[in-house]
Image: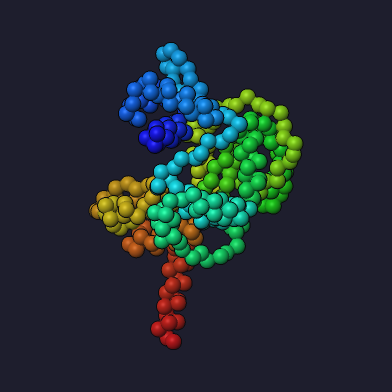
Amino acid sequence: MRETSARLLRLLSLLQTRRDWSGVELATRLDITPRTVRRDVDKLRGLGYPVDATVGVGGGYRLGAGAEMPPLLLDDDEVLAVALGLQSGATGSVVGIGESSVRALTKLRQVMPSRLRHRLEALQVDVVQREPAPSAVDAAVLSAIASVCHGHERLRFDYRAHDGSETRREVEPYRLVRSGARWYLVAWDLSRDDWRSFRVDRMEPKIPTGPRFAPRELPPGGAAEFVARGIGRAVTRVRARVLLHAPIEEISPMVDPAWGTLEDAPDDRCVVALGGESPSSIARWLSAFDVDFTVLDPPELRDECRRRAEHHALVAQRYRGA
């Protein structure tokens, strides 16, 4: 009897990990016959778990939606991952989930085997409390936006731009994307007739939502890549090419392809092409290479590097005279 109960739990766990299973696959994983799989599925149904079955080529089993939620079966590593995530609570990019995280963690601790409780307690750390990030969003707002994305419903909202101006927007919402501590909505802007990404912390959604829409194909690369390209354009207002007086093998580990590219140059030198918000920000990056360099373009960067060098020389002179 105990062996049968353990097998039923393993079967239920497998059905939760994947949408569709063939009878042969389940029999192989459980080391039983397909006939025993059918009997075990009937036992799960008798216990109230909705297991759907299809026959013929491509047929199999899937866990259906029911009135009662089946027990969530996790392995040891999955339990610890969930517990640590709850223990962290709101990490600065989302607010309004702290108390819920504590309640969920308390419930999880109550059903944890002792070996896992001991591992979790050993991983406890103190956290320096700080104010939420300026770009933090409320969990309820994220949930509301995720809901209209899933339901393919138009969304109206007031939007505050970078310069503080406000506009009313109506969009077809598609995906939420997180980049660092910021959340973005990728949507089709009806007034611009084009794809746009919006910072969620600058949005004030309006209720009720609009009518349903027929989904469009996302931009090339998907929502995350679309947001990444937009962020890159926003922070790359200046492009520069600089000749570094060092071989490419020495410089290559310091250059991230996300913001710069390298090419060989004669006499064991190389050229880096990079972007930044301003000549000043690029000049700060160049000092990190700690090698001699020659600015090829633009002239504004050359002037900025000269001003910084003069400033450092003046500071050094004052220090020596102190």
How is the rendered protein coloured? rainbow
> Percent position (x, y) of residue 176?
57, 40
Q: Percent position (x, y) of residue 175?
A: 57, 37
> Which residue shows up at 38% across the image and 23% down it?
36
Kindly indicate the quadrant of the structure image that contains residue 13: top left
Q: In this view, does 206 lie above or below 41?
A: below
User: Along the line of sight, which residue is nearer the eye, 90 or 197?
Assistant: 90
Towards the viewer: 306 or 134: 134
Q: Which residue lies furthest to the top in this view?
A: 56
Q: How many marks?
A: 0
Q: In which quarter of the image is the N terminus?
A: top left
Where residue 188 appears, as percent x and y from the top left, is: 62, 33
Res 299 visible: no
Residue 65 at x, y percent in the picture: 56, 29
User: In this image, 97 relative to 54: left or right?
Assistant: right
Q: Indicate left or right for 231 with 162 as reference.
A: left
**Any part of residue 290 in sight:** yes
